[in-house]
Image (spheres, helix red, strand yellow):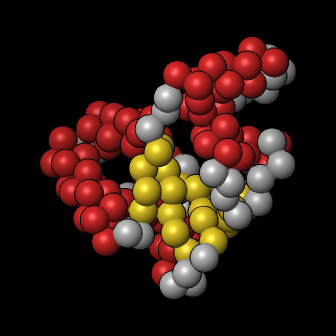
């Protein structure tokens, strides 16, 4: 079984039909092998809920949360909670790469994706490629 980390951009692309990556994300998600287990973090979910709340609606954010709960319940998804150790390691990355536009959440995702480890990152943020991850489907 392989693991794939799901970034905020992938969640948004799957949820929002008007997202520029919606079609690409939907096709990629549907073609994932049955043996793939998805991983995300509470920080990524926080970003996603907040984006949905303010740029779409509260109802959309609540529906998305229910999908997350259902995916966890069925074993398709694991949510990794950012611990003080993950945050400390992420802060080191954030501080070291001042020449990059990494968000702190990105840095926590890098740490989780290395420690887990995951086989690929499902998303569109090229920062994951910068840090050496296999980004799928990735930016155009």
Q: Residue at x 51, y 74 (%)?
A: 29
Q: Quadrant of the C terminus?
A: bottom right
Q: Quadrant of residue 17?
A: bottom left
Q: Residue at x 74, y 41 (%)?
A: 127
Question: Can residue 116 be seen?
Answer: yes
- The answer to which of 12 and 119 lies nearer the viewer is 119
Residue 125 x/y as whole percent:
66, 47
In the image: residue 47, left or right of residue 56: right
Residue 9 x/y as whole percent:
53, 50
Name the residue furthest left. Answer: 59
Q: How many marks?
A: 0
Please, is residue 64 above or below residue 80 in the view?
below
Q: Residue at x 55, y 50 (%)?
A: 7
In the image: residue 31, left or right of residue 47: right
Residue 138 x/y as whole percent:
69, 60
- The answer to which of 71 and 30 lies nearer the viewer is 71
In the image: residue 108, left or right of residue 60: right
Please, is residue 13 above or below residue 75 in the view?
above
Q: Quadrant of residue 47?
A: top left
- The answer to which of 113 and 103 lies nearer the viewer is 113
Residue 21 x/y as whole percent:
55, 62
Please, is residue 2 above or below residue 140 in the view?
below
Question: Can residue 123 be seen?
Answer: no
Q: Quadrant of the N terminus?
A: bottom right
Q: Residue at x 82, y 43 (%)?
A: 130
């Amino acid at each position: 079984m392989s693991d794939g980390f799901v970034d905020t951009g992938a969640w948004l692309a799957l949820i929002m039909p008007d997202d520029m990556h919606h079609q690409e994300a939907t096709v990629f998600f549907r073609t994932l092998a049955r043996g793939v287990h998805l991983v995300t973090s509470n920080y990524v979910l926080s970003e996603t809920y907040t984006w949905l709340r303010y740029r779409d609606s509260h109802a959309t954010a609540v529906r998305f949360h229910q999908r997350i709960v259902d995916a966890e319940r069925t074993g398709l998804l694991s949510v990794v909670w950012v611990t003080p150790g993950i945050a400390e390691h992420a802060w080191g990355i954030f501080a070291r790469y001042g020449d990059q536009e990494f968000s702190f959440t990105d840095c926590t995702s890098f740490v989780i994706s290395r420690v887990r480890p995951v086989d690929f990152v499902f998303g569109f943020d090229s920062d994951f490629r910068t840090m050496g991850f296999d980004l799928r489907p990735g930016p155009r």
